[in-house]
Amino acid sequence: MDKILVHGGHPLNGTVRVSGSKNSALPILAAALLTKEPCVIANVPDLSDINYMLQILSHLGAHVERASGVVRIEAGKLKTAAPYDIVRKMRASVCVLGPLLGREKEASVSLPGGCVIGDRPIDLHLKGFEALGAVSRIEHGNVKLFANELRGATVNLRGKQGPTVLGTDNVMMAAALAEGTTVIESAAAEPEVVDLANFLNKMGAKIEGAGTRRIVVHGVAELHGAEHEVIPDRIEAGTYLVAGAIMGGDVLLRRVDPSHLGSLIDALNLSGYEIEAKADTLRIKGHPSPKPLQLTTEPYPGFPTDMQAQMCALLAQTEGISVISETIFPQRFMHVSELKRMGADISLDGHTAIIKGVAKMSGAPVMASDLRASAALVLAGLRAEGVTEVNRVYHIDRGYESIDDKLNQLGARIERMKA
């Protein structure tokens, strides 16, 4: 098991290229199961979550080839069951349910279990499938779906913490091959949902309204192969923006879509950071005396929950009192206790973090609890005095392609070692 050593105090300057979006690539790869014809997906990041998804597709009978960020998938004859020993490693594996149900009218996928950032049930996914005519049941830890036929319907996918992204993806994929028209109300509007819809439309689907709260899917008899390039990863881009803010340098991000980062850019601007946005680049310059912030995580286009931990790392070292309220995953504050080990002054009041900025933090051994928490600990270590030892970095490898190499290219000093 690897660990990362972050030697603090090295300014960041230079250029970094943003990888393809993990949260787009996973459902897009799964969507290739909807056709027997080959699909070619470009700009696929090299991540452990992607590796697990490709293993699942191979197990289901798809022929998978991968080279230099391009994945070719040809799903001829399919199996309809995905086993626990693969699925347990990645919650997003449930997004094969929609394609299997749509194409084969049945699916059996092991439930991936709990998550350290809180309960993330798939009840809304099942609600959508059942509206289309499927029967669902849970047996021996597996969710099983059956349908004689799928028919279009109207379904509302709003949950207690807002719309479900993977649920929207799943229902959209199943509905693409349903008879008639499906209307998804309270749909997730994230750019990753739009990216999936664009890919499905290239395959011959008829989907309207992606990117809004109301998606209309006109079912078609079959889909064909297609080529597609995955959008840039907005959370990776946001993480490097925050890294530039923490270290006060001049950092340029290439191959990024600034329109996907509006709420984060607005927050950093309010804090005083200068950000220059062009068609596919973002540039951030440090600020000698940034201001504290009050943030609340919300469904897109609101402030993303996936950037909450990174902002905690920034605001912990910003003079004044900042407040972050977490409305999507109220338990998503596992990083706070680790940041406090480094000298941060953060207190929790329910789902709200009250952050009193400190003049300096110090390196310490810390434990990554989840993907975004691990990124926050690395960011905090960039500025902390001494060495920060981040353990359990397999979390960070789930969603950040070569984060240590990219930060080192900007001037950081980071080592990856065997724990």
Image: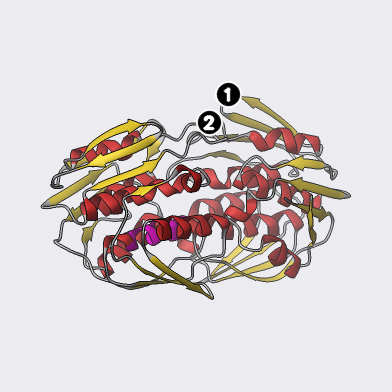
Vertical comparison of 74 with 3: above or below = below
Of 187 and 40, nearer the camera is 40
Neighbours of disc 1 within 10 Å: few (<14), some (14-19), many (20+): few
Marks 1 and 2 close (CB-CB < 8 Å) = yes
Residue 213 is a magenta residue:
no
Q: Is residue 157 left or right of residue 287?
A: left
Whole-percent x, y for residue 349 in the image: 62, 23
First in sequence, mark 1 or 2: give its number. Answer: 2
Judging by the rendered image, the residue that carries numbered circle 1 is 350
Q: Quadrant of residue 344?
A: top right
Whole-percent x, y for residue 108 in the image: 33, 43
Q: Is residue 278 visible?
A: no
Vertical comparison of 341 with 276: above or below = above
Whole-percent x, y for residue 9 in the image: 84, 56
Mark 1 lies on a secondary structure that is: loop
Q: Is residue 228 left or right of residue 288?
A: left
Residue occupying the point 66% across, 63% down:
402
Coloration of the structure image: secondary structure
Mark 2 lies on a secondary structure that is: loop
State whether the magenta stretch is mostly helix, strand or loop: helix
* Magenta range: 23-32
Vertical comparison of 204 with 386: above or below = below
Vertical comparison of 282 with 177: above or below = below
* Amino acid type of the residue that numbered disc 1 sits on in the rendered structure: Gly
Judging by the rendered image, the residue that carries numbered circle 2 is 330
Residue 26 is a magenta residue:
yes
